[in-house]
Amino acid sequence: MAIQILHRKNQAESTHKIEKIDFSRFLSGMPARDYIFQNIPYEEQIRQVAELLEDADAVIIGAGAGLSTAAGMNYGGRRFTDNFQEFIDRYGPAYMTDMYSAGFYPFPTQEEKWGYWSKHAYLNRIEPDALPLYRSVYDLVKEKPHFVLTTNVDHQFWKVGFSDEEIFATQGDYGEIQCEKGCHPKVYDAVELFSRMNEARTGCQIPSELVPKCPVCGGNMTMHLRCDQYFLEDEHWHEAAARYGDFLSEYSGKKVVLLELGVGFNTPTIIRFPFEKMVRQEAGWSLVRLNLNEAVVPESLGERAVGINADLAGSIEDIRKLCAGTGEERAENDA
């Protein structure tokens, strides 16, 4: 395969010796003038995508924040003010503008920091059931070999039925914590702890006895989110990266649909640019980009790229219905 995301060492060697993934090796180098919003009727685009998926040997999903937003996990607006008004009142609306930005307020105490983050994690990771849009995505690809590459940290792919072996979540998880200074390469499941914090919180802070401390250095803990140089790429992270690399290699030379959902330009070097480069280098691969207002695709990819500039949830449902109808017609013909 032309693109090599990473490679395994000798199988007898430790998985810790897997090379670190370097997403900068995937920059597409696509000139800006090549990007276009396609002037194709929406219904025709939906038909094109359904045909590509029907004909594919495998599907790779690339999911960004836009997918969770379209699914109803909005971090701003009423959902933020309805749930975090006490934090807005305490720390000021200039700093508490949305759930994500508010998390990086310089809370004066650990009790206040975890008062905020435990509620954030509870609302966005622990409390929500599998969301309907994510279920539709799963239904769309479950009959095909598939893999998920995502920057989302809300655990929705697991909740709807994707197996752990099929997911590479590059940016962490709202249900995990790590040493603030990354003193040892291990992350910890904090779902139960966050639930306890959420119940015990008074005002904007939790009781001191619930503040987590690093079991190795005794220092502070933090969310397992990629936000600074201390983010831990633990053993599970590297194993997921290796499985992604294996999937790319396995389907090199075959028909693959890169189904990109809600990926903007916040971290384009993880999904958006790599997907473009892979389509350029693999003649049998195609790119489907669903993202309202950011669905530009390289014109040079021709019919192997479809950029749908519409409501993501509605587009997925229309594609799913058309694929289901095609499957029923095929079954009837076979009978």
Image (cartoon, grey):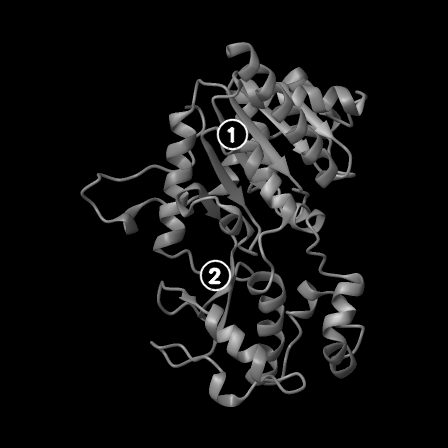
> On the image, which quarter does residue 325 sit in?
top right
Q: Residue at x 41, y 32 (%)?
A: 247
Residues at marks 1 and 2, CA–CA distance in whole angstroms: 29 Å
Residue 288 vs residue 216, the one in the foreground: 288
Identity, as a three-letter code, of the amino acid under mark 2: Phe
Secondary element at image label 2: loop
Residue 36 vs residue 67, the one in the foreground: 67
**Relative to 68, is 31 above or below?**
above
Q: Residue at x 59, y 43 (%)?
A: 135
Q: Percent from the top left, x then y, of residue 104?
A: 64, 70
Identity, as a three-letter code, of the amino acid under mark 1: Val
Q: Is 115 placed left or right of 176 in the picture? A: right
Res. 28 in view: no
User: How many numbered badges does the structure rendering display?
Assistant: 2
- What numbered label is drawn on residue 231? 2
Residue 213 vs residue 201, the one in the foreground: 201
Q: Percent from the top left, x then y, of residue 246?
A: 37, 34
Secondary element at image label 1: strand
Q: Percent from the top left, x then y, of residue 185?
A: 36, 63
Task: Report the mark closest to the observer, 1 or 2.
Answer: 1
In the picture of the structure, the residue carrying the numbered disc 1 is: 59
